[in-house]
Amino acid sequence: MGLLLFMGVLLVSTFVLLEEQQERALRMATENAQDDLQFMKHMLSDSLQQNNFEHLDGLVKSWGRHVRDTQELKLTAANGFVLGHFQRQGPATHPYRLEATIPYSYQGEAKLLFIKDLGNIDANIAKLRWKLLAGLALIGLVLWRIAWLSFYRKEKALALDQANRQLRETAMQLETTRAYLRNVFDSMPSILMGVDTQGRVTIWNKRAEDVYGLSAETVRGRPCVEVLPDAAACLPDLRAAIDSGEPVRFERHLTHVDGIPHYSEVVIYPLSSELELGAVIRIEDITQRVQMEQLMLQSEKMLTVGGLAAGMAHEINNPLSGVLQSSQNILRRISPELPANRAIADELGLDLDAMGRFLERRGILGFLEGIREAAGRASRIVADMLAFIRRSTAEFSPVSINEILDTVVRISANDYDLKKTYDFKKIEIVREYDPGLSPVSCDRTEIEQVLLNLIKNAAHAMAEQERHGAQRILLRTTDEGEWARIEIEDNGPGMEEAVRNRVFEPFFTTKPIGMGTGLGLSVSYYIITKQHNGTISVESEPGMGTRFIIRLPYVSSPQAQPPAECKSGH
Amino acid sequence: MRLVARHALTIFLISLSTFSQTAAAVDRNDQPLILAVHPYLPFQELKQRFQPLARYLGRILGKRVLVRIGRDYQEHLTYVGKDSADIAYLGPAGYVRLVKKYGRKPLLARLEANGKPVFHGYLVTNPGSGVDDIHSLRGKRFAFGDPISTMSHLVPRYMLLQAGIDVDDLADYQFLGSHENVALAVLSDAFDAGAVKEEVMQAYRSRGLKVVAESPPFSEHLFVARANAPKAFIDQVRKALYGLSDTPQGRVILRSIKPSVTALVPVKDADYDNLREVLRQLKEQGVE
């Protein structure tokens, strides 16, 4: 609206200006025409005074042709004879007539008629008018364009704003997705490391941060070789995976952390996105799995060996029973005190007393007794082994801890150590039993396994230490009200705090590879705490020996029961 | 001995003279011919009018012919009189004066305008002048052309004298130069009457010019040759000039000299005797 008003004012002003200009131009043109007329008058007057008539027509025509806007120029003698005449073709559009008289010869005056066509001025003004109108139209067009553009820009700005909003929303979604992905990555138990084609780190998850102690911000963008020196060996595989588009997998990649062997599974997944090339490396710590597999293997082996041993024990038990029984029968049948023996001796004329003295003096009776004792001991060993191997389901029954300890000592003494790393017979076993200790409700086999494990560990520990003094294992049982306390103490090398804190962790072992699985104490811990609701702890100082303390409730059951309940039940 | 020496010198001088003449003749053969024209019109106009004729003659004569325009009537007469021009074009009065001063020249041809080899002079007036005949010119203002012009001064002066009117009997008289200027001055009533040749009278008759008196016929303008021109040359030129009217191209050349020219015809000195008589009488009256 404002634009239209402005254009209207401009138009009116222009036309007013044009009118003024036209008037002014006409005024100037008429003044010029007067000047022209005077000039011609003088010029023609000279010729007339000099009676130079023949050039007059030429002068008039020449003037008429060359002076712009001359419509007609006519010089007439006093008698009406036309001395010179010029007339332009076509009618004048705006004729302006001027006349003058020129005296000549002796009488009369020549008349000079000058008609100037001011139409050119009108035409020029008209042209100017059209030009101005065109100019105004152009200005209007430009202004309209500017207005339109500003409107369009506003629209564009709105569109841009909307686009920005959408962009922000997209960015937020992207951020959410990124956070979600980040969460996914961070939640993965495996180490995830993304690399680009140049091998620079792009992804570094929480697990990787925890394991390697390097934050994602620190490592992002750095060469993976710099971050993980071990990765240098994998670079060809990384390149191969990216080039081929096929994942590359390494199992049981062995590394050592603080000297402890760790197994990892490394999988390189190539990224085949059009946007980004590279790979994601997943590193999973499979140490436990590998160790579990080793244990399983060992267990299978043990089961096989156990089965063989059980069969063998059973087969040995029969002849052994025969030996034992026969040795007992021999002793009984040479005894002079048995009436049946005397009757047969009398009948045969044999002096039983003399034979008794003979057998005694020759030590035959001692041999026979030895045979009986040896057979009996062998029979007990076999029975114990069979009982240990049997692995019956958990069956809680009141058991004397002191008795279990003795049994375990016996088994330990007979434990066949293939590598001969220790000799149990050299170890002094000191028993400090509480004779009044009540039987404890427990799974005998399980507790036997725990105690055997602890005693064997003590023997191992002492064997590793080269010492001059006697190796000694102290077995102590004490009554603690609701608990039976069992202590197994050695005078071995003791443990550092770092080792002490981890002894119950699965697969933690300080024994050489192949010597231990690292599961013994963790299984013991499980048996005592979970199956019997008891406690197990360790006290040790380097050079001061080690003491394991087991506390078992007197009353327990195969079901997991809270210790409080156990205590109250006692 | 002195006599021998004198003869020897004479013989040497004669030999030298003979050699010079031979050399001059040789030079003359190489030089272009000159066609001299009296200045009765502006220079360029005359050049244009006579250039076709010069080219024509050059072709016939086997030589280049240059057109020379005289500075004025007197200079032209002197140039022609001294035989500087090979061919010359002259007005009737000019020819009479030339012969009188420099002797006869070989005549080549005279113009024939509108079929007549003669022309007239006219005394003219405008319709409002009140002049009816030559006698009523007394006490009037009279315009002559050039003082040496045959038809705008000498013949009219003779006619006036014959009518008993001298210039002193006129209210005023002036020499206005050209015949056209005289006609226009009379028509615009700057003068009551004037004298013009026939051609101009015809041109302005339609615009109101009125004839007061007509002169007797006088022989037309003519071509002459230099006095020392060889007869063969004169014959060759005459033949060429006479033959112009026989061909369309020749007629174009003739019209180029003046639109009314129809031919170039033979001429003899006696054709100018009446004019010679007029001039003699004028001289007696003190008019030259």
Image (cartoon, coloured by chain):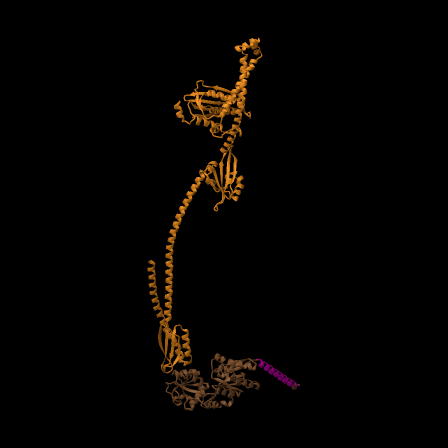
At 52% from the left and 44% from the top, the residue drawn is: A244
Magenta span: B4-30
Q: Position of residue A395 (x, y in %)?
A: 45, 24
Q: Is residue A147 above or below residue B58?
A: above
Image label count: 0
B14 within the magenta span: yes
Q: Position of residue A547 (x, y in %)?
A: 47, 24
Query: What main secondary structure does the magenta stretch of the protein show?
Result: helix
Rendered-image quadrant of the C terminus of chain A: top left
Rendered-image quadrant of the N terminus of chain A: bottom left
Farthest residue in the front direction?
A347
Residue B177: quadrant of the picture: bottom left
Q: Nearer the viewer, residue B224 or A355?
A: A355
Asked whether, in this view, residue A29 is left or right of residue A394, the answer is left
Q: Position of residue A16 (x, y in %)?
A: 33, 65
Asked whether, in this view, residue A274 is left or right of residue A18, the answer is right
Q: Is residue A433 above or below residue A96?
A: above
Q: Nearer the viewer, residue A80 or A8?
A: A8
Please name the color used to draw chain A: orange
Q: Position of residue A541 (x, y in %)?
A: 48, 25
Examine the rendering and report whether any part of residue A339 can be seen.
yes
Farthest residue in the right direction?
B1
A472 within the magenta span: no
Q: Which chain is brown?
A: B
Examine the rendering and report whether any part of residue A470 can be seen.
no
Q: Nearer the viewer, residue A120 or B212?
A: A120
